[in-house]
Amino acid sequence: MVKKMKKTEKLRGTRTIGRGTMKKWRGKGHRGGKGYSGSKKHRKSWILRFERQHLGKKGFIPKTSKSVKAINLRDLEKIAGGEKEIVLNEHGFDKVLGSGKITKKLVVKARAFSRIAKEKIEKAGGKAVSE
């Protein structure tokens, strides 16, 4: 009489015993969930190694925000050279700030001036003209 083997006996000795590629029978539960579940707890080390930008605030830049390019008074005389009038839009600047000293009489045309910059330009005998 031929002895009939059970399926588990027949597959014993093979690598996965008929359970695919194993990993605890391919369930998600034993392996900590699907996708990014647990990313703040038990998958944190993986994320810190391979995908740091996943955690933390992302933020956004509002459409209305504008970057203002400013220049200090100490740099104005260098840009002006020997000229008496300087138009800052042509040099790529929007605003004049009051850090530094100015010795020459200059007519400075810009979109905006700080209060101190305006005072220092006029004190040196020049003019601050807003465009």
Image (cartoon, rainbow, N blue to C red):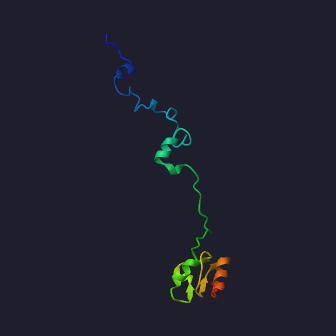
Q: Residue 117: where, in percent of width, then height?
A: 64, 79
| Residue located farthest toward the left when viewing the structure as drawn | 1
Q: Quadrant of the C terminus?
A: bottom right
Q: Residue 123: where, in percent of width, then height?
A: 66, 84
Asked whether residue 93 is in view, the answer is: no
Q: Is residue 3 left or right of residue 129?
A: left
Residue at image location 38% in from the left, 18% down from the top: 6
Residue 94, compared with residue 11, is above or below; it is below
Residue at image location 35% in from the left, 27% down from the top: 15
Asked whether residue 12 is in view, the answer is: yes
Quarter holding residue 69: bottom right
Number of callouts: 0
Quarter holding residue 65: bottom right
Q: Quadrant of the N terminus?
A: top left
| Residue located farthest toward the top when viewing the structure as drawn | 1
Q: Residue 82: where, in percent of width, then height?
A: 51, 88
Q: Nearer the viewer, residue 116 or 20?
A: 116
Q: Is residue 30 left or right of residue 10?
A: right
Q: Nearer the viewer, residue 70 or 1?
A: 70
Residue 28, compared with residue 110, is above or below; it is above
Residue 5, compared with residue 105, is above or below; it is above
Residue at image location 60% in from the left, 85% down from the top: 108
Q: Residue 109: where, in percent of width, then height?
A: 60, 85
